[in-house]
Image (cartoon, grey):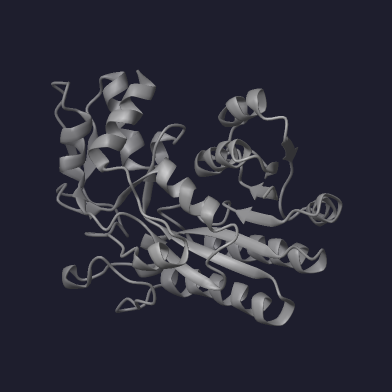
Amino acid sequence: MQYSALVCGGAGFIGSHLVDRLLADGHNVEVVDDLSVGSLANLSEARANGSGLRFHHLDILAPEFSELISIRQPSVIYHLALLPPSQTTNSEFLASVNLLLAVLEAAQKHKVKKVVVALPANLIYGEVHARQLPVKEGHKPEPMGVAYVMANALVDLMTVYRESYDVEFTALAMTNVYGRRQRPRDGVVAAFANSMLKNISPVIYGNGRQTRDFLFIDDAVDALSRAMTKGGGLVINIGTGVQTSVQDLWKLIGASTTLRERFEPARHGDLQRNSVNATRARIQLGWAHWTSVKAGIAELLGDLN
């Protein structure tokens, strides 16, 4: 079945890959992006191949956003411009509430039936004890931090609009997504790949033994695509459940070089460990990851060379 999708943040890393997937599946796609983070270059393939793509250089908070929803009447709104994956400040959290409210208000006003959002799993769950990994949905960190409170406030907002205004939602709690088009500042995989390409020593913050659940972009986009019609009213973990240390990650990426890593003090707020249980995703979305870290890194490096 053909749907019309509006992707907020569609010129960004994850958003542009989602646009490619939706167009390949035969859907009509509208992209809204203010290009503060995203780039039109990320949409070059979609613009060349997809006649069903329209781009709008627009701030979600602008009055024209609601007007656009009224005119285009999308079947689903993807909100991928909600929160950065790391080093999120309190002001960014507060801004995210306004952004989500603008999307939900437009959806409610113009009868859009579904909103799909992506949230960083590390912000939702915080530091989790090793024996509780991979972490399941609903886990509450001890002590609760600002990130947990604000991330769950966003979910509460969506729940209110679902119950009061019949705006369905699915919130995907994604782990560390990596792949082509990611900026070096936005992920350790991209930073390491950039170091290798430029032949400069990679920086590891902390001792390198901290672990992450690395999720290949194609797998992440597959989950987003499935959430278009499934998983209503739920927070759903999207990840591999496999922990890889930052030091082991560099061994994979830098295997063909003689570069030596450079260690810097750990950054405030960096987690020691992270991985999620994706059982709910298998049940509700029919989703499971299929790309191992080794295979994903090999594909990324092949694309970059």
Quadrant into which the C terminus falls: top left
- Horizontal and vertical percent position of residue 196: 27, 24
Location of residue 28 by image quarter:
top right
**Residue 203 in the image: above or below residue 101:** above
Location of residue 174 by image quarter:
bottom left
166 lies left or right of 21 = right
- Horizontal and vertical percent position of residue 36: 61, 40
**Residue 233 in the image: above or below residue 38:** below
81 lies left or right of 249 = right
Q: Residue at x 64, y 48 (%)?
A: 7
Q: Residue furthest bottom?
A: 164
115 lies left or right of 208 = right
**Residue 48 in the image: above or below residue 25:** above
6 lies left or right of 250 = right
- Horizontal and vertical percent position of residue 248: 15, 41
Q: Residue at x 31, y 20 (%)?
A: 198
User: Which residue is more in the foreground, 24 or 44?
Assistant: 24
**Residue 197 in the image: above or below residue 81:** above
Q: Residue at x 61, y 55 (%)?
A: 79
Q: How many marks?
A: 0
- Horizontal and vertical percent position of residue 63: 82, 55
Q: Residue furthest front?
A: 1
Location of residue 251 by image quarter:
top left
User: Which residue is more in the foreground, 117 or 202?
Assistant: 117
